[in-house]
């Protein structure tokens, strides 16, 4: 029976497809690799599925095993190597299998992740329990993936080999049994030596990088990976100016007579004794010629900056040139709204019909060379406000704590924290805090309402955990019997429109003192027994 008889065609096709896939992955992962070892030694764990039969039946998988290999890469083709592989797999009650293989390996090298494929041939030593040992010819194909840890060590994440051999039972059947073995392994790879030669490179610089015509520029080149024992040959060229020394590491460029623009000094570094194809490096450094062409610098302002609709604002500009001997020829004014009337370096803006807007005015100054500079100022236009409206900002209640019905509880605290932020965002106006009570409470109606309003102010202004609002903008008031709550009214600055008023009367804060949320204040004298008490008016 021929050696390849019984090899499953599906298995062969699968192996070929696997090899193609690994090749494609390597091509996609290809990059400049600094690690190109001359040899590598591998050792690790191995699992074998014999997938074959002996006289007493099918051989089971062998979980105890090792695999080791040595690969020697060719000097002229660093990715091709000659691989010598050996492995042992042991099941003393069933069968032992040893493999010795020699072949070719190709590795798609990358500094991080390197897949490989290989083909091998050799021999297999099969030792079934209770049967004759046999040496048989074997062929193998497979591949795997290595993860580089450093220049010395890599991890073989996975290695898979298909190994074909055979076994002749002999005792009861002269038919040779084909073994299509699958071997899986993982372990550590040690890299020995390195074929890699780091490429030489050059870096050029120009100092300063921008000058006026006539000022010198110094250009310098520095090399990387050149042999420090060898004398380097330098060569300079430039697209503008004159070099004082074209064969030195540093040279000066005379820029006299150059026009505005960007020029390049190019350098070549050559190591005459270096390896061919790795002894020359080039670079370039740019420098710019910027002759004085500075535009005018313009400053402008409006007076006044805020006007009522229909009033006039005056825009005045002052422009100068940073360049000597340059004068300002003219000014022009533009605005998206309003009517401008220019006169020299100033203009008037008529704001008729523009209430509630901000008008940007742009001034453009032109110098004697035609260069321009601009500035922008703004005029705010407002409409006269004849009266203001009182705003209702809501309330917070004092119903959840009957034992301390004057205390600012957590719900009320949340309302006050948000109201303090709102008060900060509305800086022009005051807040009236009107305290109410109900007729069922045992203490004087006015005293309890006043206490609640001053406690609210105390939390907003003085409480340790409060938001620290401006106390001069908060006025406590007592408002009578309308429920256990304080109500908030914001009164903007200005004349309050007719018919609007904040109810209640101002609290005498020298008589009724504010209390902290955490204060332990004894309840006042009760008017009726068995009723909740409130803090005394102090």
Image: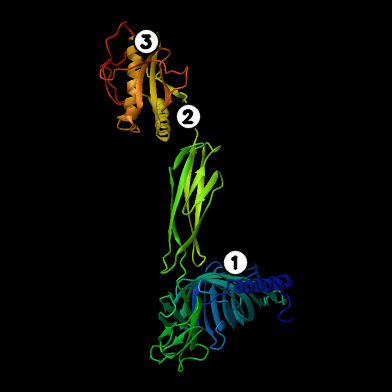
Please tell me how crowded label 2 is: few (under 14), some (14-19), or many (20+) other residues with Cα within 10 Å: few
Q: Nearer the viewer, residue 165 or 81?
A: 81
Q: Is residue 423 above or below residue 57?
A: above
The quarter holding residue 131 reads bottom right
Element class at badge 3: loop
Task: Residue at the far top: name it.
Answer: 528
The quarter holding residue 503 reads top left
The residue tagged 3 is 441
Circle nearer the N terminus (3, 2)? 2
Image coordinates for residue 247, horizontal then vertical, percent: 43, 91
Query: Is 58 situated left or right of 152 in this image?
Result: right
The quarter holding residue 181 reads bottom right
Image coordinates for residue 304, horizontal then vertical, percent: 43, 42
Which numbered circle lies on residue 61? 1
Placement of the N terminus among the 4 image quadrants: bottom right
Element class at badge 2: loop
The residue tagged 2 is 385
Task: Residue at the far bottom: name it.
Answer: 273
What is the C-alpha distance between the residues marked 3 and 1? 90 Å
Which residue occupies 50% across, 33% down?
383
Placement of the C terminus among the 4 image quadrants: top left
What is the C-alpha distance between the residues marked 1 and 2? 95 Å
Query: Is 432 situated left or right of 337 in this image?
Result: left
């Amino acid at each position: 029976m021929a050696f390849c008889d019984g090899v499953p065609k599906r298995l062969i096709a699968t192996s070929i497809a696997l090899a193609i896939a690994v090749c494609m992955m390597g091509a996609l992962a290809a990059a400049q690799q600094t690690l190109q070892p001359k040899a590598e030694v591998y050792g690790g764990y191995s699992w074998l599925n014999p997938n074959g039969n002996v006289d007493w039946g099918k051989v089971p998988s062998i979980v105890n095993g090792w695999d080791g290999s040595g690969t020697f890469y060719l000097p002229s083709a660093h990715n091709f190597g000659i691989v010598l592989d050996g492995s042992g797999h042991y099941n003393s009650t069933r069968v032992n299998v040893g493999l010795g293989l020699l072949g070719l390996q190709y590795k798609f090298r990358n500094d991080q992740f390197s897949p490989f494929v290989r083909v091998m041939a050799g021999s297999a030593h099969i030792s079934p329990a209770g049967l004759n040992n046999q040496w048989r010819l074997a062929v193998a194909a497979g591949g795997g993936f290595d993860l580089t840890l450093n220049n010395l060590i890599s991890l073989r994440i996975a290695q898979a080999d298909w190994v074909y051999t055979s076994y002749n039972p002999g005792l009861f059947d002269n038919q040779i049994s084909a073994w299509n073995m699958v071997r899986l392994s993982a372990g550590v790879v040690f890299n020995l030596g390195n074929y890699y030669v780091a490429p030489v490179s050059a870096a050029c610089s120009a100092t300063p990088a921008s000058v006026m015509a006539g000022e010198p520029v110094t250009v310098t080149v520095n090399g990387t990976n050149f042999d420090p024992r060898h004398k380097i040959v330098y060569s300079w060229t430039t697209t503008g100016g004159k070099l004082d020394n074209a064969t030195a590491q540093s040279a000066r460029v005379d820029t006299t007579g150059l026009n505005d623009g960007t020029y390049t000094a190019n350098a070549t570094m050559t190591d005459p004794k270096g390896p061919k194809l790795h002894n020359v490096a080039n670079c370039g450094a740019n420098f710019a010629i910027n002759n004085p062409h500075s535009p005018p610098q313009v400053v402008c302002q409006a007076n006044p900056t805020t006007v009522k609709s229909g009033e006039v604002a005056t825009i005045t500009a002052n422009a100068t040139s940073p360049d000597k001997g340059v004068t300002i020829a003219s000014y022009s004014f533009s605005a998206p709204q309003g009517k401008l009337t220019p006169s020299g370096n100033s203009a008037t803006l008529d704001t008729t019909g523009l209430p509630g807007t901000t008008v940007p005015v742009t001034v453009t100054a032109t110098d004697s060379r035609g260069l321009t500079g601009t500035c922008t100022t703004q005029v705010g236009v407002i409409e006269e406000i004849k009266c203001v409206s009182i705003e209702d900002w809501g309330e917070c209640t004092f119903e959840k704590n009957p034992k301390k019905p004057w205390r600012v509880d957590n719900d009320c605290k949340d309302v006050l924290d948000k109201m303090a932020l709102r008060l900060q965002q509305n800086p022009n106006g005051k807040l009236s805090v009107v305290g109410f009570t109900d007729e069922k409470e045992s203490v004087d109606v006015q005293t309890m309402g006043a206490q609640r309003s001053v406690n609210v102010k105390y939390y907003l202004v003085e409480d340790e955990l409060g938001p620290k609002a401006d106390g001069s903008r908060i006025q406590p008031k007592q408002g009578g019997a309308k429920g256990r709550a304080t109500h908030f009214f914001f009164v903007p600055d200005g004349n309050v429109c007719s018919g609007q008023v904040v109810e209640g009367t101002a609290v005498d804060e020298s008589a009724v003192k504010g209390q902290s949320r955490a204060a332990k204040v004894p309840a006042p004298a009760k008017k009726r027994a068995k009723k909740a008490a409130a803090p005394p008016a102090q």
